[in-house]
Image (spheres, rainbow, N blue to C red):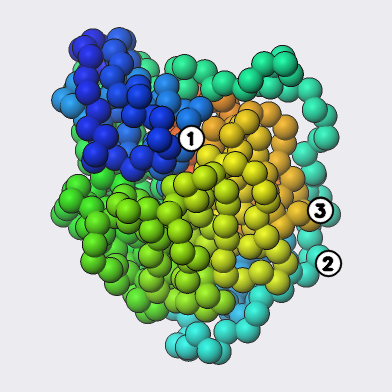
Amino acid sequence: MNASSVSKTCPIHWEMLYLPTRSIQESAKRTCNGARCLKGSALRHALNSFVGMSLIALFALACSSEGASGDADPLPDAGEATGQEPPGDTGDTAPGNDTGGVDARNGVEDAGPTDAPPGTEEDVTEPTEDASTVDEDVETPPADTANPDIGDATETPKIPDDFGVITSDCPEGFAGDECDQHSFQYVTVGAFHACAVTFDENLLCWGLNEKGQSQVPPQYFRQVSAGGQHTCGVHPDGAVTCWGNNEYAQADAPTGQFNHVSAGDIHSCGTHNDGSVECWGSNVFDKATPPPGQYLEVSAGFFHSCGIFTDGSLTCWGYNADGQTSAPDGEFLQVSAGYFHSCAVDTGGQAHCWPVTDKPKTVAPPGNFAQVAVGDTHSCGLHWDGSVACWGDNLKGQIDAPEGVFVQLDAGLNFSCAVRKDGALKCWGNNTDGQCDVPSP
C-alpha cells in the first residue's frame, strides 16, 4: 500500500493488540492523511515498544486502511558465542553485539562464534564486574541540563502528535510498489542477528545463523523478538513459536495466548492476555521466575529480567550482585533489560538506568525519550524529536548513531538498529557477522 493512497478513517482492532494503558482505546479512530499507515503488526510492536498514555497519538495515527521489542560482554570462554551461561563478567570491554541488550556473546573480539562446551546451569559461577577493566577513553555524557526537548518547566511534558508516524516518503532509491517492500515497520535486535518486518508484512532476519536463529519459519507473526541465539514470535492467534538454539529450552515456548514476547540470552518471557508473565528456558539466578501480578510489558535480559506492572511500577528479578534488580521507584512507560544493566522511560519522558554506577552506559543523557534500548556495554534512546542518542562504550562504534528522524530502535550486544521516518532501516556498530548489513527484501 502506497502512503499517498491513504486518506481515510480506519478503526483499530484493539482486541488484537497489546494494550499497555487503559486510556489508549479512547483514541481508537483517527484519519491517516499523507502518511503510510502502519499495519497491524507494526501497531502492536509500537505499542510494545512505546507504551504509555503519552503515546496515544502514535497508535491512533498509525492505523491501517485495511482495519488494522560498561559491562563487558559476559565472557564465559574466549571465542564462544552467546547462548551459554557465562561464568563471569570481565569488565567493560566488549567483543561483539547486544541484542540491544538481551543476549550475551562470549568471546574474544572478532574471534567469531563457536559452540561453547557443554555444561549445566549448576556449573555457572556468579558473574562479576571488574571496574579496573573499564575503558578509560570512554567519555561520560556531559551533565549539561540544557535540552530543547524539555521545554517550559511549567508545562506538562507531551510527546509530539506526529511522533512514530512513517511518512509518505519512500526510502531513497525506491518508488511505487517498491516502497512497501523496502520500508520497515519495526526492527528487533539480538546478540549477533536482527529481524525486521516490512510494510508488505515480510519478516526478514540476518546476521549470525549458526543455530538457525536467522532462519525465518514460513509463518506469519504479529510481533517478533531476537535473542541470544534464538528468536521468538507471536502469531495472530496469540500462540508463540521460537526457533534457533534450544540447549536450555529457551525455544520451547509454552502453550497459551500471548500479547508480547521477549527473547533473552538463554531464556524467554512473554505476557499473557490476562496480564500475567510466563518465562521459560534457563532459570539460573531465578531469572525465569517472575513475581506474580499483572504486567504491561516484560523484557528478558542476560542474567535478569524486568517488567512493568499495570500501575506503572517497575520490578526486576534474577541476578542482583550489582543491583541489577534494584529498579527505581516511579511510574514508567517502557523498560529494556540488558546484560548487566537496564534502562526505562518514566511518564515524564526521562530515561533512568541502573544499577547506578559511574560507568557511561548507565549515565543517560538529558532530554525527553519515547523509548530506550539496552545492550551490553552501551545504551540507546529515541528522543521525542526522533533523534537517536547512544551512550556507553564505543569500541565497535555502537554509540555512533546516525543522524535523522527515527520512529523505533533496538540495541544488541555491540550494535544497534533503528527505523527511520521514511521506513528505511539503519544499523551501526559491530558487524563481524553481517548483523549491520540490512538485506534487500
Kind of residue indicated by mark 2 = Ser
Circle 1: residue type: Gly
- The residue drawn where x is 61% and y is 38% is 346
- Seen in the image, is 257 located left or right of residue 357? left
| Amino acid marked by disc 3 | Asp
Q: Mark 2 points at which residue?
A: 132
- The residue at which mark 1 appears reads as 52
Left or right: 217 with respect to 70?
A: left
Q: Do the residues labelled 1 and 2 touch (CB within 8 Å)?
A: no
Q: Is residue 267 above or below residue 192?
A: below
> Residue 251 placed where, x, y %?
32, 69
Measured as percent of width and height from the top left, residue 149 is found at 66, 21
Residue name at image x 70 percent, y 72 percent: 321
Q: Earlier in the sequence, mark 2 or mark 3?
A: 2
Specify which label sits upstream in the sequence, 1 or 3.
Answer: 1
- Please tell me whether mark 3 sits on a helix, a strand or a loop: loop
Label 1 – label 2 distance at C-alpha: 39 Å
SS type, badge 2: helix
1 over 290 or under it: above or below: above
Instruction: Pinpoint residue 277: horizontal percent, then vertical percent.
Output: 40, 60
Residue 94: quadrant of the picture: bottom right
Q: Residues within 10 Å of mark 1 (few under 14, many from 20)?
A: many
Q: How crowded is mark 2: few (under 14 residues within 10 Å), some or many (20 or more)?
A: few
- Judged from the image, the secondary structure of the residue bearing numbered disc 1 is loop
Q: Nearer the viewer, residue 391 or 274?
A: 274
Q: Residue at position x 67%, y 49% from top?
A: 329
- Among numbered discs 1 and 2, the one appearing first in the sequence: 1
Quadrant location of the C terminus in the rendered image: top left
- 140 w.r.t. 162: above or below: below
Total numbered labels placed on residues in the image: 3
Residue 358, which numbered label? Answer: 3
